[in-house]
Image (spheres, helix red, strand yellow):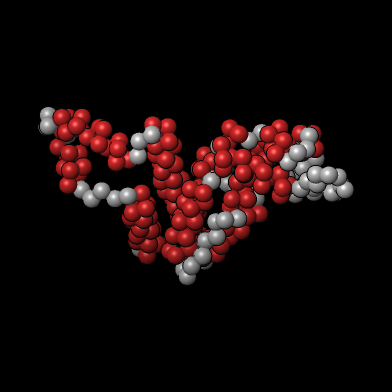
Amino acid sequence: MLVWERPEPQDRPVPAPLSRERIVGAAIRLADEDGLAAVSLRKVAAALNVGPMRLYGYIATKEELLDLMVDAVHAEIRPIGDGWREVLRSLAETTRQAAHQHEWFADLLGGRPQLGPHALAGGEAVVAAMGGVDVDTVMPVVAAVNAYVIGAVRGEITERRAERTTGMDTRQWQAAFGPYLERTFATGRYPALATVIRDGAHLDADQTFDVGLELLLDGIQSRISS
């Protein structure tokens, strides 16, 4: 029986009452502060001032705990809007916001579909908004948007982590490596790349995400309308 269907133990009058909600909340706080490496049943139990064995009545494995954490974050992803395009844009934007709020979430996105109640509710809202779209097209469209968001968000989170590790933000990194690129481009071996980097618009992360998303949605609209 999956954790979503398995009932919780009856609460007992003890100094530190437990529930899956409390366990998941403590795990999320640990992950928000120090990443997924900080999450273990032992550390979660310590944060709740209980023995690790008490957690096993509620969660059988760390994998179940991670599933519950991911689904809890899916509660923050509420796709809304009039029509499929607005709902897909909302899905992308709220997923990105959740990943920036919980960096570890980006590490667990992708792979097999999430089956928790909050993830299913979000999926229902998205699919319902695409009621007029051919049924065979719905899932590839949703998969394309999710793939774009996952790739973009992981890139942004990786950049944020690199800034923390190196102590250099994007501008400082560009200033440090700019002379090398100028010398390299001066050789004439990379003319197309040199033109784009020198003359193209330099968008920030928000602008880059928005432009890429609109390009994707335009393509989807063209395919659906054809």
Q: Quadrant of the C terminus?
A: bottom left
Q: Is residue 14 visible?
A: yes
Which of 69/48 is in front?
A: 48
Residue 219 occupies which quadrant of the picture?
Answer: bottom left
Residue 160 in picture, x, y percent from top left: 42, 40
Nearer to me, 200 or 31: 31
Q: Residue at x 80, y 44 (%)?
A: 16
Extreme residue in the right direction: 13
Rendering coords of residue 159 (x, y %): 39, 39
Left or right, residue 36 beside residue 145: right
Residue 197 appears left or right of 158:
left
The correct choice, above or below, for 128 with respect to 165 in the image is below
**Residue at x 56% of width, y 40% of height:** 33
Report the residue that reaches farthest toward the bottom: 82
Residue 138 location (% of width, % of height): 49, 57
**Front-most of residues 6 and 162:** 162
Q: Quadrant of the N terminus?
A: top right
Q: Is residue 55 above or below residue 127?
A: above
Side of 210 where 54 appears, left or right: right
Front-most of residues 59 and 131: 59
* Image coordinates for residue 124, horizontal then vertical, percent: 58, 60
Question: Which residue is pictured at 55% across the width and 56% down the height?
Answer: 77
Is residue 151 among what the camera can see?
no
The residue positioned 43% from the left and 64% from the top of the image is 85
The image quadrant of residue 195 is top left
Horizontal side of residue 73 vs 158, given as left or right: right
Mark count: 0
